[in-house]
Image: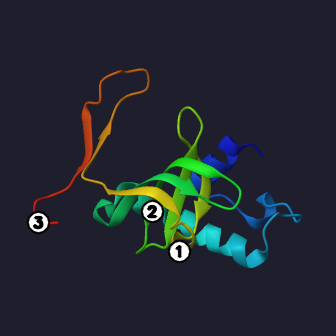
Amino acid sequence: MSERDFYLKCKQGIISTGNIRTDQKYDWSTLRGKANRIECIHELLYQNAEKTLLLNGLITHTYVFPVAIRNDALNSCIGFAGNINKARSLRKAGTSRNTAVEKEIVAIWGRADGSSAYDECVYIKSENN
């Protein structure tokens, strides 16, 4: 299935073992770990921002991701690539330490597709954190 169809099935909660090919690049343990991280991906993206770091230049064995986010408490890291920073890798936090720069996230702003203005405050760090 296409990347988009896979994403939509995951989002709708209807992905099944029938959607996974038997010949895989990764072993079953790795795939199970990725599935567990996918299950909590909403927490990585929309909750616990105070525990999530923005990474510039995440270096892996196969690729250098210009941008990534890592949450050690969730043991998850997402590497983004391409001109629109598309999610390309879901990794363990422990194997995502080789970075050029790690930054604390203090605010996340959103905008509607096609808009040039960021007008939605998704997250802002409180003074207590």
Q: Which mark is residue 128?
A: 3
Residue drawn where x is 63% and y is 68% of the image:
35
**What residue is shown with label 1?**
94
**What residue is shown with label 2?**
70
Question: Percent position (x, y) of residue 43?
Answer: 41, 63
Label 3 to label 2, Cα distance in Å? 21 Å
User: Please, what is the three-letter code of the amino acid marked with disc 1?
Assistant: Gly
Q: Single out the residue that lies furthest toward the front.
A: 100
Residue drawn where x is 70% and y is 73% of the image:
30
Q: Secondary structure at mark 2?
A: strand
Q: Quadrant of residue 104?
A: bottom left
**Disc 1 vs disc 2: Cβ atoms closer than 8 Å?**
no
6 or 48: nearer the viewer: 48
Q: Secondary structure at mark 1?
A: helix
User: Please, what is the three-letter code of the amino acid marked with disc 3?
Assistant: Asn
Residue drawn where x is 53% and y is 74% of the image:
94
Residue drawn where x is 14% and y is 58% of the image:
126
From the viewer's perspective, tell me whether residue 99 is left or right of residue 111: right
Of pointers 1 and 2, the one earlier in the residue sequence:
2
Q: Single out the residue that lies furthest toward the left.
A: 127
Mark 2 crowd level (few <14, some 14–19, many ≥20, 10 Å Cα): many
Question: Percent position (x, y) of residue 62?
Answer: 71, 56
From the viewer's perspective, tell me whether residue 22 is left or right of residue 9: right
Question: Percent position (x, y) of residue 41?
Answer: 49, 61
**Disc 3 vs disc 1: Cβ atoms closer than 8 Å?**
no
Q: Quadrant of residue 29?
A: bottom right
